Image: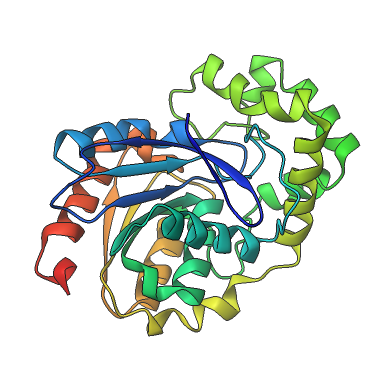
């Protein structure tokens, strides 16, 4: 994959779809311990419709190039801005999930000028950063040694696909989930990156940011899997209400990773928000 050298990190990314698209470019932000492959089904659908899609591997634990810069949630939000700027993208549709959805909220709070519209799937919000039981899991993963121990245990597929791992996936792909953990299993620097990030997540509360979300007056779509026991539909409705111009689509038979469970619903939301009269504002 190509990479971008930013002031604080080197970020690998995948790009798909026509470079000279008539539609606004789409930039995706995944969550902790996954990578750009979370978004491939959605990006492939959008690319077939003529959208230019950029899928970076953000330094959230499954990245392959260690980072020496700021690995706070706010620091990763600055990286999102830097990637958009480095690629010369304008009027971006920003799409986030899980921890990445929290980072998207920080982006539209701090750098609203680079974002044209926002699409969020099930993600952290308010004081749910992270929600139960992942607040307990993250508490166990704030040191390099504990990360090494737990990720080694996750080599066992039953544990990896349990509620302590990727249990919220409806149809987990054993090879994919194993590969998401491999950087932490094999690289001490990646483990140190993840430990730093999780310590800073523990000290971050999105409630303060949520109080400023009404300032983001551009179009927002939420695509929420209703079978999510962690990021519940009620949390999604509360988050949608925080934005002045937001709509929410509830997706039955989908959970946290809506992009894998129901990629068509996410692609349709991106298309709608990018092509509607509201999306042109």
Q: Which residue is situated farthest in the right direction here?
A: 145
Quarter of the image holding residue 120?
A: bottom left
**Residue 134 visible (yes or no):** yes
Closer to the camera in the image, 175 or 29: 29
**Residue 133 visible (yes or no):** no
For the point 31% across and 50% down, the residue is 26
Please give the count of numbered marks on the rendered protein. 0
The percent coordinates of residue 185 (x first, y second) are: 76, 24
The percent coordinates of residue 62 (x first, y second) are: 63, 34
Instruction: Specify the color scheme.
Output: rainbow
For the point 20% across and 44% down, the residue is 51
Q: On the rendered structure, is 42 left or right of 200? A: left
Q: Is residue 175 above or below residue 23?
A: above
Q: On the rendered structure, is 55 left or right of 6? A: left
For the point 63% across and 57% down, the residue is 7
The percent coordinates of residue 103 (x first, y second) are: 53, 60
Q: Which residue is situated farthest in the left direction here?
A: 277
For the point 51% across and 59% down, the residue is 82
Q: Is residue 82 above or below residue 66?
A: below
Closer to the camera in the image, 82 or 248: 82
Q: Is residue 233 above or below residue 162?
A: below
Q: What quarter of the picture does the C terminus occupy?
A: bottom left
Q: On the rendered structure, is 262 left or right of 80? A: left
Quarter of the image holding residue 163?
A: top right
The percent coordinates of residue 240 (x first, y second) are: 36, 69
């Amino acid at each position: 994959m190509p990479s971008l050298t930013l002031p604080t990190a080197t970020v690998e990314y995948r790009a798909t779809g026509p470079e000279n698209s008539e539609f606004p470019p789409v930039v995706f932000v995944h969550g902790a311990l996954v990578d750009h492959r979370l978004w491939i089904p959605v990006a492939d659908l959008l690319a077939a419709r003529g959208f230019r899609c950029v899928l970076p591997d953000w330094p959230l634990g499954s990245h392959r190039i260690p980072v020496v810069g700021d690995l706070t949630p706010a620091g990763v939000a600055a990286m999102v801005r830097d990637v958009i700027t480095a690629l010369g993208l304008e009027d971006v549709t920003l799409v986030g999930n899980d921890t990445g959805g929290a980072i998207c909220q920080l982006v539209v709070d701090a750098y609203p000028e680079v974002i044209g519209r926002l699409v969020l799937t099930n993600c952290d919000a308010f004081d749910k950063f992270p929600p139960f039981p992942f607040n307990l899991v993250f508490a166990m993963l704030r040191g390099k040694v504990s990360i090494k121990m737990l990720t080694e245990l996750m080599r066992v597929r039953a544990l990896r696909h349990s509620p302590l791992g990727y249990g919220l996936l409806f149809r987990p792909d054993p090879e994919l989930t194993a590969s998401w953990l491999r950087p932490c299993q094999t690289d001490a620097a990646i483990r140190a990156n993840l430990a730093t990030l999780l310590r800073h997540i523990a000290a971050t509360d999105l409630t303060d940011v949520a109080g400023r979300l009404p300032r983001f007056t551009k179009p927002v779509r939420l695509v929420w899997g209703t079978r999510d026991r962690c990021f519940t539909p009620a949390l999604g409705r509360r988050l949608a209400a925080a934005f002045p111009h937001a709509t929410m689509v509830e997706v039955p038979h989908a959970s946290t990773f809506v992009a894998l469970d129901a990629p068509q619903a996410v692609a349709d939301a991106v298309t709608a928000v990018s092509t509607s009269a509201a999306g042109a504002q």
